[in-house]
Image: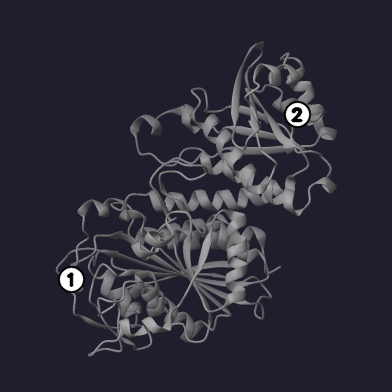
Amino acid sequence: MRLVAPEFLTITPAESRKAARFEKFDAIVLTVAIANGELALLTNPVVDAAILRTGFDFADFTSSWPQFGAKSGELVEIPVKDVGSLSRIYVLGVGEGTREEYRKAGAAIGRKVKSHINAPGLKVLMTSWADDSRQAVNAEMSEAIIAFICAISLSHYGYSMKKSIASSPAKKKANTFLFTAAISTELERAKVLSDAVWNARDLIHTPSNIKNPEWIANQARALAKATQSSALTVTVKSGRALAEFGGLRAVGNSAPVPGPRLIEMKYAPTGSKNWPHIVLVGKGITFDTGGISLKRPYDAMVAMKSDMAGVAAILAATCAITAIKPKVRITSLLMCAENMVSGTAQRPSDIISQYGGTTVEVLNTDAEGRLVLADGLAYADLELDPDYLIDVATLTSAASMGLGKQYAAMYTRDSELAQTLAKIGEKTNDRVWHMPLVRDYEPALESTIADLAHVPVKAKFSAGSVTAALFLEKFVGDRRWVHLDIAGPGRSDKDTGEFIKGGTAFATRLLIEWLATFA
C-alpha cells in the first residue's frame, strides 16, 4: 500500500478570514531567498499574524544563525513552546529562487515533514512568494511554484506492505500545507502532475506476485474509470486476439497463466477527429528473469518488478491528461507480459514474426523489451496512422552506463521534436539526452536466416542502446518517432530529492506537459 499523499490548500491575504478553519497550525515554513546578495524573507500579512504570537524575529534569527545562507534546501528547525498546537518553525532557503532551487527546497521540506516523529496529520502554514497578486507570478515563477509543490508531494511518497503501517490510523492522515498566495492555477497543475506520478509509482512498486499482465489491465480500467471522463476508453487484447503479435506472444507465453495482454487506451474527446493523433507505446514486462538467457548476476533480478515502468508512466499520463484537456487524440498501447523461465519460454535461435510480418532471429531472451515494443510500434504504424509515435521503456543497461541515473536516452531523427522534449524534460525533472541513430551500426542487426537479428550478431558493435533503437526504428515507418530508453533514471538506488528508492515514474510528467502543449 502507498502512504498517504499530502494535501494542499491556498488562500490570498485578502481571503485570510477563510483561514479560520486552519487556525491551528503545527508548523510554519518561512521561505528565505537571496536577493542582491542579501537574505530576504518572503512573507505577507497572513504569515506575519501567525508568527507574531510565537515571538519569532527574523533579525534575531539571522544574528543567532550567521551560518544560514539561504542556500537551496538549507533548513533550520526552531522549536516553539506554549503557542497552542504550533510546535515548530522551519526556516527554508530557496537560493535565488530558480525553478531548480525551488525544487530542491520543496524536496527538503517535504522529506523533513514526512520523517518527523509527529508527521501524520501535520498542518503546515507556508509563506507566499514575493507578491500575492496574479501579476507577480510570471511564467518563470509559475514553473518554479509547480516544481516546488510537486517536490513536496513526491518526496512524501512511500510504499509498504508492513502490517504495522497498514493497521496504523496515524499513517492514514495526510499532512496538509496551506499556501498564502494566489496560486490556484499552479496548485491545480502540480496536483495533476504529482497525482499521476504517485499512481505510476504505485504500479511500479507493486510486487510481481500480485502484478501480472491481467492485473495491469484491471488497474488500467480502474484508473480510467476514476477519471470520470467519457473521452477515455480501455480495451484489452489477449489469447487469440494477439495472434499477429509475435513478439508479445513469444515473450508472454513463458507465463501462459494469465498470458500477455495488449491494453489499448484511447483518449478521444467529442470533436477530436481532426486533432493531432499521438500514439504512446510502453514496455510492460511485469517481471523479467531474462528468460532462458537467465540474468546474471542473479541479484539483478530483484529490481525487475519495475521493468514495466514505461507502461506505468504512459498509463498514468494518459489518465492525467483528461484533467488538462488538450486538443489531441491519444492512443496508448501497453505491451504487457512476463518474461519467465518455463517449458513454454522462447529459446535463443527462435525465429518469430512481428506484427506486420517482419521475421526476427531471437539471440538473447533477456533482450525481450524490444520484441514487445516492435509489435506495438508496427501496429501503430500500420493500423493507427499516428502523427507522433513515442515509446517509453526500461530497455537497456547500456543507456544507464552511458548516461547514468540523471538522463534518459532519447532517440529520434526529428531534431525539432527532440529539442522540445529536452526543454520540457528540464522543466519537469525528466531529463532526456538526444542520442545518435548511427546508420553505420545497422549491420549489427543483419541475420542470415531472418529479416533482422534483434541483438548485435557481431561482437564489435558495443553500443547496446543505439542498436536497440535502430532495431525499433525498423518498425515505425516514416512516422515522427521518439524512443525513450529510461533504464537509468527509471529506478533510483536511494532516496534522493523528490525521488525515492525504487521506481521513480520517470517520464510521467514529461509526457503530460508535452501533451499539454497541444492547446
Q: Position of residue 298 (x, y in %)?
A: 20, 54
Q: Report helix, strand or loop for mark 1.
A: loop
Q: Position of residue 222 (x, y in %)?
A: 48, 56
For the residue pair 17 and 80, the one nearer the viewer reads as 80
Q: Is residue 240 visible?
A: no
Which quadrant of the view contains residue 268? bottom right
Residue drawn at (18%, 79%) of the image? 349
Q: Dot 2 corresponds to which residue?
A: 19
- The correct choice, above or below, for 407 with respect to 438 in the image is above
Q: How many marks?
A: 2
Q: Position of residue 320 (x, y in %)?
A: 58, 58
Q: Report helix, strand or loop for mark 2.
A: helix
* Mark linked to residue 329: none
The amino acid type, in three-letter code, at marker 2 is: Ala
- The correct choice, above or below, for 431 with respect to 71 in the image is below
Residue drawn at (48%, 58%) of the image? 407
Q: Dot 1 corresponds to which residue?
A: 344
Q: Quadrant of the N terminus?
A: top left
Q: Residues within 10 Å of mark 2 (few under 14, many from 20)?
A: some
The amino acid type, in three-letter code, at marker 1 is: Thr
The alpha-carbon separation of the residues under discs 1 and 2 comes to 63 Å
Residue 421 lies left or right of residue 356; in this view the side is right
